[in-house]
Amino acid sequence: MDEVQVKVKPETVTVYIMGQAYQVPAGLTILKALEYAGFRVVRGVGCRGGFCGACATVYRLPGDYRLYADLACQTTVKDGMYLALLPATPAERRAYDLRKVKPAGDTLLALYPELARCVACNTCTKACPQKLEVMDAAQAALRGEVARVAELTFDCLSCGLCTMRCPAEIPHYHVWQLARRLYGAYVAPRAHHLSRRVQEIQEGKCAAELARLVRLPKEELRELYKAREIEPE
Amino acid sequence: MSLLYFPGCALKDQARDYERAVLSVLARLGYEVRELPRWNCCGTVYSLAQDDLMRHVGPVRNLIRVQEAGGDRVLTVCAMCYHTLRRSARFAENPENLRRLNAFMDEEEDYRGGVRVVHLAQLLLEEVGEERLAQAVVRPLEGLRLGAYYGCTLLRPKELAVDHPERPEILERLIAAVGAEPALFPERVECCGAYLTVTRPDIVRARAGAVLVSAARAGAHALLTSCPLCKFNLEERRPLGAPRIPIFYLGEALAWALGAAEIPKELRPFLAAGVMP
């Protein structure tokens, strides 16, 4: 077969999707470039806003040995980019009862003993689209520092790229989730004002006011809404 | 004097008392100890495989952290961390190994080599010195016979030994400097059984028994170690009937003598009359 002749217009870039060259408009995200090229993406896509982590993907650039990892909905295409579609990263979440596990010592390690296989290679950190210090979190998990793990992984989207790349086969995002749950359940200060408020509501403090609002004509309700007190920013 | 410090995982978990003791001792000796702002596991077990570069990445990354913090030496108090970091530092002295390590860690600044890994015992003997240590003592441990249990990681292989690998005296000199009497016993440089504690606890029980009997014959009231695994094995794999000698960390005994921690109840009866517990 003859060599594929690719004619590049100034406003387009060439990307290679699973080996096949496509011309796509410059400035598209990887996700939109895939769709522009005709792929119907129904898995490995979600919010399209950089929050859900479903569109985790990997790519390479010409003349560069690195395997880059990022979110397909947040990364614009570059000329010569090699793209692929990624499925989800399978990983097992261990069974635990949050009321019984404790936020200290070896809880994380007991449920996820593969943490001890971490050799601090830092491949996970390089794969993180959120630019988290993933390896530092794995190391903190190894020594049972639950609060530190929760803090380091607060912005984790559970996209699974670190888990896909980890040579120690650690299911990071499940470990992080457990750490954050432990933190929320046992370490974070209790919001006492909230439980007081809930109690007030249960005791009927708002019942009369609510009943009045429910019976209010739509127009009056709208006026009330507009005139509501708003906390200063 | 400012001192960069690598704690290691055990000191942040099972051995927190050890860390507290060591930090208070070093503060009393005038050191301003700075924990490395970032660090990872030392590697725990030095890899003996010929072609296993990946196992050296973790330890050498810690040496890069020392470099980043502007230091050329780092203090370890755990014998295991000392061993692995020191040995990987030697591994990285080979230019080909260094090149491969730096090529792999392309997200870090290159390790330039030359970071010295120092164990607590070396720092105390070689830099502080017995004289200054003795001057800092507020509660001499007179009457106590303390056995120094070196185990393997401080002494073998000889290239990284903190002292003579078969006839060490560095820990005994520290014990003497704080007023206690060193109890010399033949098994002090023998292995505790180490990681066989997982797969062959029977072997470790035999080893722990031999160490404890040997120490008891030498009249030791307590044993000092700086290795969390030795301590675990001597305590948790003690065979039935073996002498119940308490095991402490080196830094704890120094903290008793320097007035930074209370002398444990079980040792108070051995103290010479006149020594305030």
Image (cartoon, coloured by chain):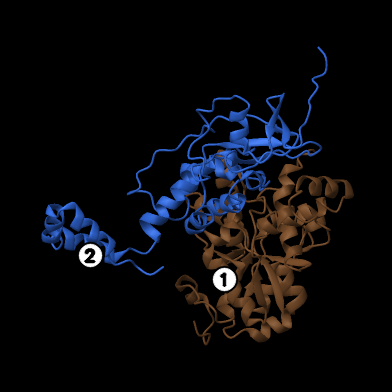
Name the chain letter of the residue that bears numbered label 2: A
The structure residue drawn at horizontal position 71% and vertical position 38%, both measured from the top left corner, is A67
Residue A192 found in image quarter: bottom left
> Is residue A164 or residue A155 the one in the foreground?
A155
Q: Position of residue A218 (x, y in %)?
A: 19, 52
Q: Position of residue B29 (x, y in %)?
A: 66, 81
- Are there few (<14), some (14-19), or many (20+) residues within 10 Å of tag 1? many
Residue sticking out furthest to the front: A219
The structure residue drawn at horizontal position 50% and vertical position 85%, both measured from the top left corner, is B276
Residue A73 found in image quarter: top right
- The label on residue A196 is 2
Decide: is B176 above or below A209: below
Q: Does the CB distance between marks 1 and 2 fall below 8 Å?
A: no
Residue sticking out furthest to the right: B95
Which element type, helix, strand or loop, lies under badge 2? helix
The structure residue drawn at horizontal position 39% and vertical position 61%, both measured from the top left corner, is A188
Decide: is A177 above or below B276: above
> Is residue A138 or residue B33 the one in the foreground?
A138
What hue does chain B carry in this figure? brown
Q: Which residue is mark 1?
A: B252
> Is A154 left or right of B63, judged from the image as shown?
left
> Is A195 left or right of A26, judged from the image as shown?
left
> Is B241 left or right of B63, judged from the image as shown?
left
What hue does chain A carry in this figure? blue
Decide: is A43 above or below B81: above
> Is residue B13 or residue B219 the one in the foreground?
B13
Name the chain letter of the residue that bears numbered label 1: B
What is the spatial separation of the Cα atoms under label 1 and label 2, in whole angstroms? 47 Å
- Residue type at tag 2: Arg
